[in-house]
Image: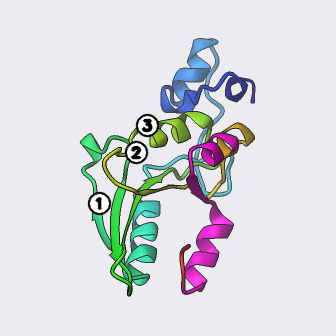
Amino acid sequence: MLVDDVSLDISMKLNSQELFGLFGLPSPIKTMTRGDSSYVNDGLALEERCKTLLESHGYTVETTPRSNDGGIDLITKLVDHLGINQELLVQCKDYGRPVGVEVVRELIGVRPIDRQVILVLAAPSGVTATAEKQAGRGSVAIWDEETLSKLEEEGHLF
């Protein structure tokens, strides 16, 4: 919480072993399961979940290469019944705790200036209060677990 208040997402820079190692302490994190607050995975399952969700709503979905994605995991496009092109840029963060403001800022930073896009941060555990404020200012849609579940059940995204 203290680190979030200074707008750093330290989990993007250090894993738990490195963080506890700074203070000469062993990491208390032994196993990581979805219900644990220490849970972090590589995000591939969430990417696949979002891809399936978007494809079920008629979007074409491109998965970006992991080594050079610039903070974007999925690039999606849909031409609606009126011929209007809609493009979503989706970042997936599957942490066992709320995502910090640094991730939101990174996503806003990759918004193209030459076309209209919708930025989406898929974060089942939600975002911190600071990140939520930044997302609102930067027009970033947050898809937490509740939102993802509703989108999977309903027939429209926006």
138 to 19, vertically: above or below: below
Under circle 3, the secondary element is helix
- Does 152 lie within the magenta span? yes
Secondary structure that dominates the magenta span: helix
Under mark 2, the amino acid is: Arg
Under mark 3, the amino acid is: Gly
Closer to us: 1 or 39: 1
Closer to us: 106 or 80: 80
Visible residue check, residue 55? yes
Under mark 1, the amino acid is: Thr
Q: Give the range drawn in magenta.
A: 133-155
Under circle 2, the secondary element is loop
Closer to us: 10 or 118: 118
Q: Are discs 1 and 2 less than 8 Å apart at CB?
A: no
Q: Which mark is residue 111?
A: 2
What is the distance, in whole Å, between disc 3 and disc 2 at their CAs?
Answer: 6 Å
What is the distance, in whole Å, between disc 1 and disc 2 at their CAs?
Answer: 17 Å
Under circle 1, the secondary element is strand
| x and y, in percent, of residue 35 in the image | 68, 57
Give the label, 3 or 1, closer to the camera: 3
43 to 21, vertically: above or below: below
Residue corresponding to mark 1: 63
| x and y, in percent, of residue 58 in the image | 37, 82
